[in-house]
Amino acid sequence: MINIDELIKNARLQKSDSLIYYQNLKNEFMKFEKEKGNILTEENQIKILSKYCSKLLENSAQFLDSGREDLAMKYAKEEYVLRQLLPEPISEQSIEQVITEYASSQNWFNEEGKLIIPKQFMGQIIKDTKSAFPAANGKIISEIVKKYVQ
C-alpha cells in the first residue's frame, strides 16, 4: 500500500519538487474516501493512481497541442514521478495463465478438448482477474478472456 503521508514527509524534508505531486495524489485519495464513504484499499489506490497518471498525460498532450510546452512538461514530469509508485506491469502471459487455470479448474472444455469459457461467466472472470491484478490493463484482460469465450 502506498504510504502517501511518508512520501510527503520525505519530500518536504528533502525540499523536493515532488512534494506537490504527492500532495495532489493525496487529494485524489481523500476525494475518493469522501465519495460515499469509500474505503481506500491498495487496489483502490492503484486504480486512482493509474487513472490520475492517465489524466496527467492527457493534460500534457493537450498543452503540447496548444503550444504550451512549459505546462506540458510540468504535467509530464508529475506523471513520470507518480508512475514510479505503480507496481510493475503484469505480463499478458501471467494474466492468461491465471484465466486458463481458472477455466480449466471449472472443466470448461468443448468436445475437441479446447478450453471454452461460457459467455455468462465472462464478466465475472474479468472482474476476478482485475481484482487479482489491480495494476493490469482491463482492456488486455478483456481481450484475453474473449479469446476463450464461446
Image (cartoon, grey):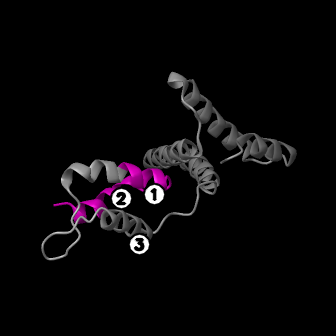
**Label 3 sits on residue:** 93
Give percent across and percent down for residue 145. 29, 60
Q: Residue at x 54, y 50 (%)?
A: 69
Give percent across and percent down for residue 134. 49, 52
Mark 1 vs 2, N-terminal side: 1
**Label 1 sits on residue:** 136
Mark 3 vs 2, N-terminal side: 3
Q: Measure how far apart labels 1 and 2 are at the Cα level.
A: 7 Å
Mark 1 vs 3, N-terminal side: 3
Q: Residue at x 48, y 48 (%)?
A: 54
Q: Residue at x 57, y 24 (%)?
A: 34
Q: Which residues are magenta?
A: 127-150
Q: Is residue 14 left or right of residue 75?
A: right
Magenta-span inclusion, residue 144:
yes
**Label 2 sits on residue:** 141
Q: Is residue 101 above or below residue 77?
A: below
Q: Is residue 122 above or below residue 89?
A: above
The type of residue carrying mark 3 is Gln
Q: What is the magenta segment's predominant secondary structure?
A: helix
Element carrying mark 1: loop
Q: Nearer the viewer, residue 14 or 42?
A: 42
Q: Which mark is residue 19?
A: none
